[in-house]
Amino acid sequence: MAAAEEGRAVPGGVIRSNGTPIRAMVFVDGSNLFYDFYGQEQSLTEKVYGPLWMISREVNWGKLPQLIARNLEEQILATQGVQRLVDVTRTVVYTSMSRQTPRNSARATMFTHMKERTNFEVHVSENTNNQEKCVDIALAIDMLYYALQDHCDLVILVSADRDFVPALKRIRQAGKRVALGIAGGRLDARWYLNRDLHCQDFRPVMFEGFLDELVVPKIRGANNVHRVNELDGNSLINEDSRGSKSSSPLPLGRPRSTSSQSPRQRVGTVVRTGRSRSGNGSKQNNV
């Protein structure tokens, strides 16, 4: 760090450099995240970009851990005057789908992209009677295990589900830090404002704060080039103007754009959303 930056004033003092990174693991409640971005009841993306946002934009899921980590680094700097690196060593996603879920649905496409385009570890179980079973339990147990086994210093939970509060409390009691990543507009997530729960060490990281960096324009070149791997910029698939393709298959859920389709047909192939949660709190995944 430059000397001038070392002495820059911040609330409560000056910046002090600490070279020890904070080891972080991100645990994602996949179904909760899906409804934040693709739910029919005014999802975050629909509110900002409109109901047909998937035609021109896509979510770069590989950026999500980095953006959350950056926000937490800024919070540490602002409150403690210390510059610390939040090093995300692992991101694990937990979700489920019905056996009848169409492969080109928004839900299937989201988790396929997470598997193929990022280094996330994605666990997809088969739901029963359109209800998600044991997924939240698996997530909570893994959070506790990795924290108690000292595999991380900071647990980042991406979920608005209050059911994780007991696990988050235990993690903090073990001397680990806890942070939340959520969509701030969700009315069912206001529990995080209750400081008496003692289940977090930072202000919740709101997706709204970096949405334009996460939901990006689809990459289309002269030959309709699509990015299929966000970690390797050389992994590309080319389609010519007639819709023919190279030997590599298209990513699941990517509708093929052809001149024979009408605008209404093209919209229909892209806009697929999931159902909202059922009234009893169980998660329905029959899209």
Image (cartoon, rainbow, N blue to C red):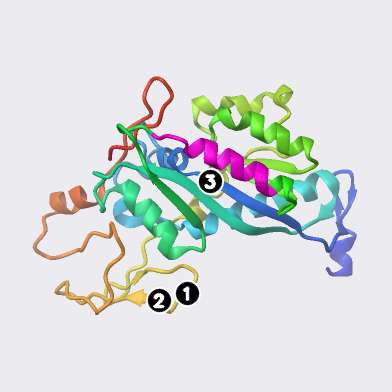
Which quadrant of the structure image shows residue 169? top right
Q: Could you give the CA–CA distance between mark 3 and mark 2, rounded to whole angstroms?
A: 26 Å
Q: Could you give the CA–CA distance between mark 1 and mark 2, rounded to whole angstroms?
A: 6 Å
Horizontal side, residue 213 vs residue 243: left or right: right
Q: Could you give the CA–CA distance between mark 3 and mark 1, rounded to whole angstroms?
A: 23 Å
Residue assigned mark 1: 232
Label 2 near label 3: C-beta < 8 Å?
no
- On the image, the x and y values in percent for residue 134 come to 47, 36
Residue 235: image tag: 2
Residue assigned mark 3: 28
- Secondary structure type for disc 1: loop
Between 161 and 255, the residue placed more toward the observer is 161
Q: Amino acid at mark 3?
A: Val
Residue located 78% across and 35% down the image: 173
Give the residues drawn in magenta, as a range. Answer: 132-146
Question: Between tags 3 and 2, which lies in front?
Answer: 3
Q: Eyeballing the image, is 130 above or below 239? A: above
Between 93 and 236, the residue placed more toward the observer is 93
